[in-house]
Image (cartoon, helix red, strand yellow):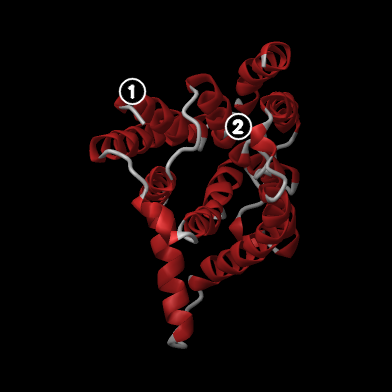
Amino acid sequence: MTIVQALLLGAVQGAAEFLPISSSGHLAVLKSILDVGDVPILFDVILHIATLIVVVFVFRQRIWGILRSIGRWIARRVNEADGENLRLAWVIIVATVITAVIGLGVGQLDIGANPRIVSALFIVTGFILIGSRFFSGTRDYREIGLRDGLIVGFSQGLGVFPGISRSGITITAGLVSGLNREKAGEFAFLVSIPAILGAFILTLRDAGELSESVGAVALAVGFIAALLVGIASLTVLLRLIRSGKLFYFAIYLIPLGIVGLILL
């Protein structure tokens, strides 16, 4: 893998992992265009680490609050203020279980090998984002419950399909379930943390492949690109969510999918 290829793949991962345009879909298409073949598993591990760091950094206050509340619950020192965080933690666990069941099944289909199918799913994501315009709830974490975890967890599982944006479908699912825009956006990324960790663990299953040759400079370039572009992308996305403008990305995805169906 060349440094330029690592830069492009890292930047695309950083942007598409957070913007609702499907990182797996874009990476599948980009790998096909660049003809890079099988990307070394170590490179995938590095990109997952960068993605996780971005989410933890941006939502560090909420994550720290949840961890403190869980700690007080374990120590049996829960106070009234911990109720919201503990409720949120429980719903995240429910969503993660649903995501794992559906995502592992979807992952066996290896759809990313077919750029035409990925292109068709770009179009599907575009219509999902258009649909997000028509939902905007008023509920916050004080009212979040099992139903929200089931809906968002199921949607995140479908986000494993290359071409279906995980962030786009989970944010839309949160809006459909009645969460307000800010909480729907935040919750979509909080539930992504276990999913990203799970994907990271899956890439480590075959430890022998980690010795596969890939230059240290290329690894560093890919990591830094994914990290910096990821922080910028997530910051921009959160502003667009609050203003109800997720559908803007459909203007990009639908034509992209149509072009892919014609040319790939």
Quadrant of the image containing the C terminus: top right
Identify residue type, mark 1.
Val
In this rendered view, identify the residue nearer to me: 228 or 161: 161
x%, y% of residue 119?
Answer: 69, 24
Q: Is residue 194 above or below residue 222?
A: below
x%, y% of residue 127?
Answer: 75, 26
x%, y% of residue 178?
Answer: 72, 47
Report the disc number at residue 246. none
Q: Neighbour class for label 2 at 10 Å: few (<14), some, many (≥20)?
A: many
Report the disc number at residue 4. 1
Residue furthest toward the bottom? 76
The residue lying at 70 percent from left, 50 percent from top is 108
In this rendered view, identify the residue nearer to me: 204 or 168: 204
In this rendered view, identify the residue nearer to me: 79 or 150: 150
Q: Which residue is mark 2?
A: 25
Residue 61 visible in rendering: yes
Query: Is tag 2's residue or tag 1's residue first in the polypeptide sequence?
Result: 1
How far apart in space, not on screen, are marks 2 and 1 (Cα)? 20 Å
